[in-house]
Image: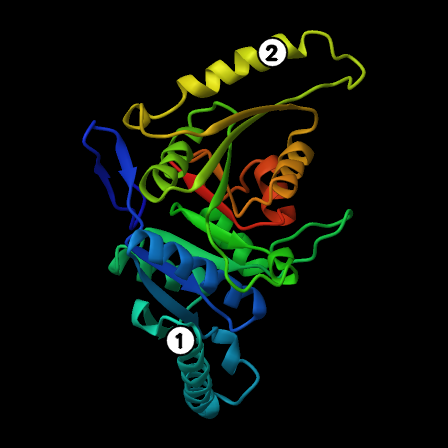
Amino acid sequence: MPVGRVTTKDDLGSTVVQLKQILVATDFSSGARVALDCALAMAKRFESRVHLVHVISPGVAQYVAAESSEEAVRNARSFAGVALKRLIQDSGCPELIRGEILSDGRVWPMLQEYALQHRIDLVALGTHGKNSTKKQLLGSVAEEIFRVAELPILTVGERNVAGGRTAWEAGNILYATNFKPHAEHAASMAYRMEQAHGTKLRVLHVVEEQDQNVKGGNDLVRDFMTQRLRKGMPSSCAGRCEPEFRVRFGDVVQEILKETTEESTDILVLGLRSGADAMGQLPSATAYKLVCQSPCPVLTTRT
């Protein structure tokens, strides 16, 4: 089982993901602040504890003399301590947050160790990357975490900051699936959120079309795929969940993005492949593009 993840069984024996401990990585940017807001909204729903963590990079002392390096780190910790305290006080629910400053290591290894020690279930982070038709990047730290972390990741992009939402709620969820095995764990997360907290859930599959002028048979394909989506519901949701099943045709990335925009989606849920063959590699190009371009936060999970 991946580091830090806590699972249990519901009354019908299906695996249920618990979100009791949420880690928010902050560098005090606007993106990280929105990630904190999103994490706090989820924490209220799941009765979770939020760990707000800032990592002081080793680079803070690289431009000073060796004898001054310790002082540079102390100054950085002092600055971070003030900023962290202000963030917690301004959050609106400081009682849910535990602040922590880490140093003496690279960002993700330090966060990973912290996640292991505190049994973290979800990592939330903002991104700083460029987003254009020519180049789509998450930012170096966010990309490393997205590439190697086995924990569920809530990624909040710059577009979410631009939207100016001050009271984010995970009330309108879109779960996109390609029916592959790694999507099953994401399904459990999405259905869990609907079942336990009354959120609106849409389950989407996009059928790729090579020729958009060929529309014959789409109704039959839509009916078949809708039934397949229904059969993919976790057994524990029978009679309890009321998701809306949708099938779209076209380019996978573009159709999912259209769905998120047209339906004012609050959170997009995706499953990523895991295992030895995926470690150290970027997830699929589709997932990466969606995380870079999504107008809403994206929750990705691995099995």
* 16 in relation to 78, above or below: above
Query: Residue, x 43% and y 85% (percent of image)?
Result: 82
Q: Which sits earlier in the primary sequence, circle 1 or circle 2?
A: 1
Query: Residue, x 38% and y 64% (percent of image)?
Result: 110
Residue 278 visible from this viewpoint: no
- Rendered image: mark on residue 123: none
Query: Residue, x 31% and y 24% (percent of image)?
Result: 239
Residue 198 vs residue 51, the one in the foreground: 198
Horizontal relation, residue 196 to residue 211: left or right? left
Q: Residue 220 appears in which quarter of the rendering? A: top right
The quarter of the image holding the N terminus is top left
Identify the residue under disc 2.
Answer: 221
Horizontal relation, residue 166 to residue 136: left or right? left
The quarter of the image holding the C terminus is top left
Q: Amino acid at mark 2?
A: Val
* 59 in relation to 229, above or below: below
**Residue 67, x across and y down, in percent:** 45, 92
* 110 in relation to 173, above or below: below
